[in-house]
Image: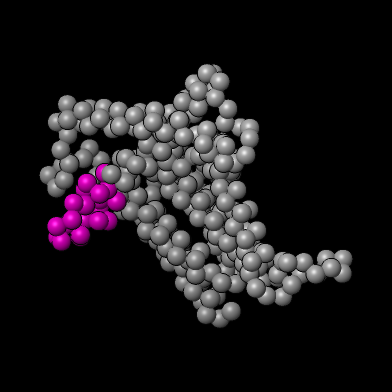
Amino acid sequence: MLKDITLGQYFPIDSPLHRMDPRTKILSLILLIVAIFLANNPWAYVLAAAFTLLVVALSKVPVSMYFRGLKPIWFVIIFTALLNIFFTPGTKIYLFGYRTPMTWEGLILAGKMALRLVLLIISSSALTYTTSPILLTDGIEKLLKPLAKLGLPTFELAMMMSIAIRFIPTLIEETDKIMKAQKARGADFESGSVLHRVKALAPMLVPLFISAFRRADELAVAMESRCYQGGEHRTRLNEIRFHLIDAFAGLLMLAFFAAVIILRIIL
């Protein structure tokens, strides 16, 4: 299950999404998330799903990786869907002449919520799959630069966000190693009730936190030993710039967002 969490991984391949400016991808992701939440009819959801599939195709990342990223949240999707189906008031559903506690309104709401979660995970994964941590940091820093006039440490914020995303796969790998080591010593994480499994995971927290703090300290020492200084006077080997593909992607994103708004108003 831990190996199925792919958020934060980067795939260095050549694709239209990889060649785009990170600022364009970040802003497009924000608009896509807003559009997914604004969708309120079947046609808008179909359009959002089609646009997300287009993003997946343009990324050239194997579709299996996106499915792997969805595996950890299937429990959340199913649990949320069941709550909506059984606890949403409305018209009761009859099966074989018997009245069930399920409602049609709950069934429709469950489908909407499940689709939203799937589209959100896929679109967010596409950003990290196609953007290296360095470019992601530069993009966030450039977008937050206007806030620097208000005294906000924009570079530090961008660095913290990118490091947090980058270390998700590392911490997952470390958790998997700790679990295997404890299983070799007789620990049982798979049998018993849910409460028992949660309690069995508690002894993992101490070594995991120790490992996380150790890696953070090693990263800080490595940056200091290289005389790393961020902020306004920092220079870069490759400056990020907008290209023609960014203009085309921006227009396509705006057209999609406008279409969702129009469908929401009309239908």
Q: Nearer the viewer, residue 177 or 265?
A: 177
**Which residue is drawn at the image coordinates 64% and 66% (left, top)?**
87
Q: Position of residue 152 (x, y in %)?
A: 18, 56
Q: Quadrant of residue 244?
A: bottom left
Quadrant of the image containing the N terminus: top right
Quadrant of the image containing the C terminus: bottom right
**Which residue is drawn at the image coordinates 42% and 44% (left, top)?**
128
Judge left or right: residue 226 versus residue 173: left
**Which residue is drawn at the image coordinates 56% and 36% (left, top)?**
197
Can residue 79 be seen here? The reply is yes
Q: Residue furthest right?
A: 96
**Which residue is drawn at the image coordinates 87% and 66% (left, top)?**
96
Q: Is residue 241 above or below residue 8?
A: below
Q: Position of residue 40 (x, y in %)?
A: 56, 72
Q: Quadrant of residue 226?
A: top left
Q: Position of residue 155 (x, y in %)?
A: 21, 48
Q: Is residue 12 above or below residue 51?
A: above
Q: Is residue 128 above or below residue 102?
A: above
Q: Which residues are magenta?
A: 140-159
Q: Position of residue 49 (x, y in %)?
A: 58, 59
Q: Nearer the viewer, residue 259 or 173?
A: 173
Q: Is residue 87 above or below residue 163?
A: below
Judge left or right: residue 180 versus residue 249: right
Residue 151 forms part of the magenta stretch: yes
